Image (cartoon, grey):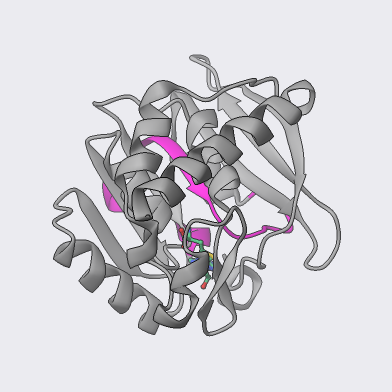
């Protein structure tokens, strides 16, 4: 029953990847990314009353006005980062912890920042209970990044930013990739892939129209 739902989720992701290939440039995602989606128990990351939708291809509310992202979007963003086993990745927006867990299957170390203390605490507790030892969760405003552990091989922002946070671009290693939805809340947002080349030059590509909860903080805290 559960295994069947997981398989159905993977098939739906594969189908949507094919349908959006002309926009994203990716007809299918790396096998390691699909394996991570198969292995991480999404049902552990959704509220108990929504368990019957745990493997549906949609975002779900996780409380405090926040959401766990749609599985296809998690797959796409993870694939765009081109995660490698030796990578150290920064995530902004821990939320439920699901995206952090997916990344932790693929890379050496995940650093994840969450601005809402209750969500950070719940995600840290859950990830530790599930046995993840390579995810560090910290309460904080992602606009500042995590300077103690910079530079990162990849940075993933899972809330919509109104502009590219300059500090995060600085904390990206040359050769690294940053994936971020940019746009105004309730308006059209674009998922951007930003690559920093060996010379430190940035190359930006618009990947897909998306809808994320807004990235908060920043201005109020002086960025
Ligand atoms: N990656 C999450 C999805 C989280 S939704 C998952 O897999 O479940 C976006 C999250 O970003 C929310 O939890 C929100 O509180 C958080 N967030 C918003 N602005 C932030 C900021 N400036 N710094 C850190 N986290 C932020």
Q: Is residue 33 placed above or below 155 in the rendered structure?
A: above
Residue in the foreground of this view, choosing between 84 and 31? 31
Residue 44 shows in this picture: yes
User: Toward which corner of the image does residue 196 lie, by quadrant?
Assistant: top right
Residue in the foreground of this view, choosing between 211 and 42? 42
Which residue is the extreme one toward the front?
1
State the image coordinates of residue 17 (x, y, percent, origin top left). Answer: 65, 30
Which residue is the extreme one toward the top?
198
Q: Is residue 21 left or right of residue 109?
A: right
The residue drawn where x is 32% and y is 55% is 41
Q: Is residue 117 placed above or below 23 in the rendered structure?
A: below
Q: Is residue 92 placed above or below 122 in the rendered structure?
A: above
State the image coordinates of residue 9 (x, y, percent, origin top left). Answer: 51, 45
Q: Is residue 45 left or right of residue 78?
A: left
Q: Is residue 72 placed above or below 174 in the rendered structure?
A: below
**Total tally of numbered discs in the picture:** 0
Q: Is residue 81 left or right of residue 102?
A: right
State the image coordinates of residue 8 (x, y, percent, origin top left). Answer: 51, 43
Magenta includes 152? yes
Residue 150 shows in this picture: no
Placement of the N terminus among the 4 image quadrants: bottom left
State the image coordinates of residue 74 (x, y, percent, origin top left). Answer: 52, 46
Q: Is residue 129 left or right of residue 91?
A: left
Residue in the foreground of this view, choosing between 203 and 93? 93
The residue drawn where x is 62% and y is 46% is 180
Which residue range is magenta in the image? 142-164
User: Toward which corner of the image does residue 124 lie, by quadrant?
Assistant: bottom left
The residue drawn where x is 59% and y is 81% is 65
The residue drawn where x is 24% and y is 26% is 86
Placement of the C terminus among the 4 image quadrants: bottom right
């Amino acid at each position: 029953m559960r295994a069947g739902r997981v398989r159905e989720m993977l098939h739906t992701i594969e189908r949507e990847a094919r349908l959006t290939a002309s926009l994203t440039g990716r007809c299918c995602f790396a096998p390691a990314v699909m394996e991570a989606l198969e292995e991480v128990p999404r049902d552990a990351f959704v509220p108990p009353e929504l368990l019957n939708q745990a493997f549906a291809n949609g975002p779900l509310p996780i409380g405090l006005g926040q959401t766990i992202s749609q599985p296809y979007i998690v797959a796409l963003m993870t694939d765009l980062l081109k995660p490698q086993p030796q990578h150290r990745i920064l995530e902004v927006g821990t939320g439920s912890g699901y995206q952090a867990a997916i990344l932790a299957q693929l890379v050496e170390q995940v650093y994840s920042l969450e601005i809402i203390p209750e969500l950070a605490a719940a995600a840290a507790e859950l990830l530790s209970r599930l046995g993840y030892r390579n995810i560090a969760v910290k309460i904080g405003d992602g606009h500042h990044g995590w300077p103690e552990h910079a530079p990162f091989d990849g940075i993933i922002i899972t809330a919509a930013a109104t502009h590219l946070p300059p500090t995060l671009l600085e904390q990206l290693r040359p050769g690294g990739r940053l994936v971020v939805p940019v746009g105004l809340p309730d308006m059209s947002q674009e998922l951007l892939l930003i690559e920093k080349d060996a010379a430190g030059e940035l190359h930006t590509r618009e990947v897909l129209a998306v809808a994320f909860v807004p990235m908060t903080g920043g201005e109020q805290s002086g960025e």
